[in-house]
Image: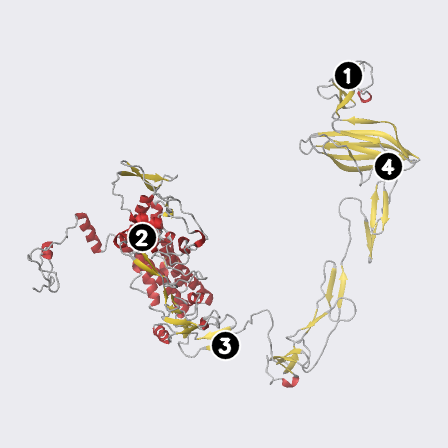
Amino acid sequence: MVDYTDFSSGINSADDYLDGKHHLSGKVSVGTNANKIAIGAEYSFTMRELLCGMLSGNGVKLPNLQLGLSCSLQSLIQNPVNMQQDVYDAIEKVEDALNDFMDHTKLDNVLGRANLVLSEAQQVASMLNFCGQPVDPIAIPNMLERAFGSFLGPGQKIMNDIGSMLPDVSCTLCGQDFNPGAFVGGFLNDIGSKIDSVLAGTLPLNEVASLLSQADALRGAVTNLINFENNITGAYNLGGSSFSLPDFGCKNSNRVGVLHNPKSGNMSDNANLANSLKSIYDNLAGYPVQYIDPDSGEVEEYNNIFELLLDDELLSILNNDDDPLPTSSNQVPLYDYCGNIKGYREVFEQQDQQVSDGTVPQDITGNPGYNAGSLPTFSTTDSSTGASSTTTIINNNTTTTGNNVHVVNSESEQLALSLNTNDIVVRTDIISSFVRKDTGLVNTNSMFDFHPMALTFTNFIASLSELQTNGIVVKNGNQALVRGIYGTNNQIVINNSTGSNGDIIARLADNTVIPGVGSIKIPSGSTLDRSTGEAGRLRYNTDTNKVEAFFADINNWRNLDGSGGTTTITFENIGSGSEVYAQTNILTGDAEFRKINGNAGITVTQNASDITISDQITAENIGNEVELFSARTGNTFQFKTLVGDSTVNVTDTGNTVTISNPGLLRATTSTTTASITTDVLFDGNSPQPATDESWFFTVKAIGKSPTTNQTRTFKIEGTVQNVGGTITMIGTPIRTDYQRSTQESGYDLWNASTTYNAGDIVEYDYKLWEVDAGQTVNPFENDPANNTKFVLHYDGWNVTASVFSNSFRITTKGDTVTDVNWAVSLEILDII
């Protein structure tokens, strides 16, 4: 038995360390040969170099950004001065979020996530194309991006949201007071831009609320990022094989079952469970167990505990030995359509590709045992009771005699539980326990439904002792908080809002603004109830039913409408003209009258004793045409008289003078569509000669297509008469088609001395006529318009003047390929 001590002056080599005589504290027993101590201590050169780098603290990219932000937040927290509690809380929340992020980016955590990605990728690769429902893998680069978003952009954004720095200042922020000029964006920039108000505790409430909102958002962003990166999964769907039929109809619902949801873990988690299950089964399958029915007391014996845990099909797989046949295979990468490797498959060289004997699992969503009712069952997530509140997390449930013990971490989670009478709830946030009162009598959905098992005042005292800022202490559950009392702009002013320098004083602001849209109640009473006169006092007089105030100019009360006081004078407008008196000013008591203003040619002149209203109105003719205005005599404007003649009628109809043409010349417009003959109307009518009146008329028309810009013009002259109510045409009107004064191109004019055969086309009367099938037209037969052997081939655009159904009509016609807009005039020379 020999006492050894550690090296006190360093060592020279590993032999000194491993010689069996040093660096072994306490008393040790040795074997028969005390000089033989076997320790594997040889590192490779590369590993030793890496270890030296780690021991030096250099080599990794240093967290200057995180440390600079942390120092800035610490300098604010350690020097709160008169800082408002909510601002202090917001800074603490951001610091907590940053601390979590810094823990998350430590090297051991980073390497841990890398190992998880590697493990998950290996498990996914080994299961490709094996199960009845194959796994759907995530590409390894995508898994790495999910696990290391802290270094790939999302983490940088969160740091910028905490405080975006100027270049090269991060290393200067530690060991000094907060530097507001170091930041150009984010939470710390907002703090720095208002640093004086922040430290003085005078930051407006809306800006305080904004800082709290930013802090909550940053806290949530860090939490979400950490949860996302720690959730390593290499498959969108875990796949799997079913070796037994689902429990249709819930037949096995009366026995305790095993809770397992494969989708709440990743491939690596499930692989670990499979390995553990096989290992434990091989060691414990030989030990029988007994089941005692709790109702009948009957005893059933099972070969092992696994018969109560697993279906027979899975037990038969566990009974099989692992396949001892070695495999020789190559891993072949699988690519997606972008050329990225999304997984691997094995190509076997000594045996066929192995696949699972199981079938594709059936998704029986109505089965309460399917996937553990969607509850998470892996250690990376918490188990839930399925309470109605999605935020409730049940860390552990313990069944006592007839009741359950529930562990939660907030009041909201406690109230969301579905409990029985006398169930116990343990609150981790306040380290207290509660018993559920009788559910048949008390159901307020509040803390009144619970009876505390122990006082929690000591927790409040502990929280109170931790406070470092000035203000008013309030009790929030069992947490002590410092709060301030703040006024509202233009309404209430609070002096010394935190009470740190004495009493808190609340007063109305100067020129107070009273909010709201309803009304304000002022003192109300009779005349005898008036208070001592003082300028500015205001009240409602119930005797006069008026609002009154005390005015210093009369040293008396006066109604706000100007009445009352020492003298009462009223004003009113009489008569039916414009009102000159406007109102009595309720503030000054002055009678206010409207001014009289001149305008345009009216002039208002104020004299010593009167007001003169005069005009400077003149009249003149404008333009270069015939003048209508003659002269002004006094207040009389004289205009010339309009006189008609045989061609123009002038008609005085009340306030209107009508100048009209008795019918000699009229004009209108018309539009034809799809070669449809359309009547031309003048002022909505077709003009007709009066009884026993005769007309010599001239019709002029021009048509134009708006799509092809083709234009055609026509003129028709003729005579029409009305004899005793019967309208007839005298002779044949003469029609001129200015664009068809010669024959249509490619067709001959009709010749009476020519023989025409079937299909021949000729022009007659500005129309094209075709000899009908099977017909021959001999010389000197009737013209095409009066010969049934001819049929009309095309008559084109046209304008006609005719008598039809005892009515004089003017018509226009276009063609089938375009609309035609027409302008038409009718000139008449009439005689009775």
Neighbour tally class for label 3: few under 14, some 14-19, many 20 plus, Cα within 10 Å: few
As drawn, 786 above or below 403: above
Q: Of discs 1 and 2, which sits in the foreground?
A: 2
Residue at the spot 74% in from the left edge and 62% down from the top edge: 603
Of the numbered discs in the image, which one, if any, rests on residue 775? 1
Visible residue check, residue 228: yes
- Say which label, 3 or 1, has the lower sequence index: 3
Return the residue at label 3: 507
Question: Which x, y percent locates residue 776?
Answer: 78, 15
Residue 84 is at least partly visible in this image: no
Q: Position of residue 362 (x, y in %)?
A: 42, 47
Locate the C terminus by quadrant: top right
Disc with the residue nearer the chain's start (1 vs 2) = 2
Closer to the chain start, of discs 2 and 3, is: 2
Whole-angstrom CA distance, mark 3 to mark 4, is: 94 Å
Q: Amino acid at mark 3?
A: Arg
Q: Nearer the viewer, residue 37 or 619?
A: 37
Q: CA distance from mark 2 to mark 4?
A: 108 Å
Q: CA distance from mark 1 to mark 2?
A: 104 Å
| Disc 1 secondary structure class | loop
Above or below 661: residue 156: below
- Amino acid of disc 4: Gln
Q: Residues within 10 Å of mark 1 (few under 14, many from 20)?
A: some
- Residue that label 2 marks: 273
Residue under pointer 4: 688
The answer to whether mark 2 and mark 4 are in CB contact below 8 A is no
Mark identifier at residue 269: none
Task: Label 3: state its secondary structure.
Answer: strand
